[in-house]
Image (tube, helix red, strand yellow):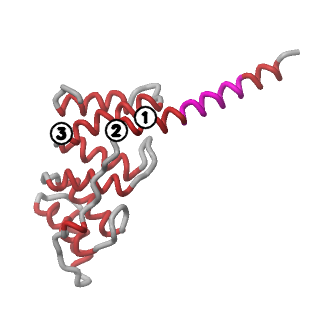
Amino acid sequence: TSTLNPGAEYDLGDKYFFSNPVTPQKLAEGIMHYRAAADAGFVTAQKVLGGIYERGIRVTKDYAEAAHWYYMGAEQGDKDSQFALATLYEDGHGVPKNLAIAVYWYQKAEQQEHTLASTYRKRLTDIGVRAQAPEPTQLPPTTTEYPSLLLEPMLVQAAQVEASASQTHVEETRTQQP
C-alpha cells in the first residue's frame, strides 16, 4: 500500500506509463500507480484508466475494465467519464447494450455542458429512447485484479521480445562473419 497522496500516485503513473524508452515493467508500474490513485477516488486517474483500456493504449483493449473506471469517474460527476460510459452502453462494449442507460449518462454529461452529449442524447431520444437510471445489476463489474498482477504477463512478454531480439542479433552476426 502506498503512502503517497492520489495526485502524486497519478503523477508517478504518468511518469512510468509515458517513459522513454518504454518497457513492460514501466508500463505495469504506471498502471499500478494510476490504479492506486483511482482506487483512492482520484477522478482524473479513473478517467485516464478508462481511456487506456477502452482504446488499448499500451495495454490489451478491455471494454469491461474501461466501463468500470468510467463508471467510477461518472459517479463522482466527471462529465467526460459520464459521456464515455454512455457510449459504451450505447454500443454494448464492456456492458450489455442499453440505450436507455446510455441516454441517462448522456443527460448527466449534458447537464455539465459536455460538448457532444446533447447531440448524442438527442439522436437517441428522437427515436423514442427515454432515460433510465441503471439498476445495481446493470452496473459495470468491479475489478478484483490487483495492479501487480498485470506485471507478470508483461514481464513474460518482455522476456519473449528480448529473447527474439537477441536471437535476431545472433543470426545477423553469423551472416556478417566471413
Residue at the image point whose x is 31% and y is 69% from the top: 90
Residue at the image point whose x is 23% and y is 75% from the top: 100
Q: Nearer the viewer, residue 152 or 160?
A: 152
Residue at the image point whose x is 16% and y is 29% from the top: 5
Q: Nearer the viewer, residue 14 or 161?
A: 161
- What x and y, as percent, mark residue 25? 44, 29
Magenta: main secondary structure equals helix
- What x and y, as percent, mark residue 151? 43, 34
Q: Which mark is residue 151?
A: 1
Question: How far is disc 1 from disc 2 in space, using C-alphas?
Answer: 7 Å
Residue ID for mark 2: 147
Residue contact at pointers 1 and 2, CB within 8 angstroms: yes
Residues shaded magenta = 157-169
35 left or right of 160 in image = left
Q: Which mark is residue 58?
A: none
Residue ID for mark 3: 40
Q: Is residue 159 magenta?
A: yes
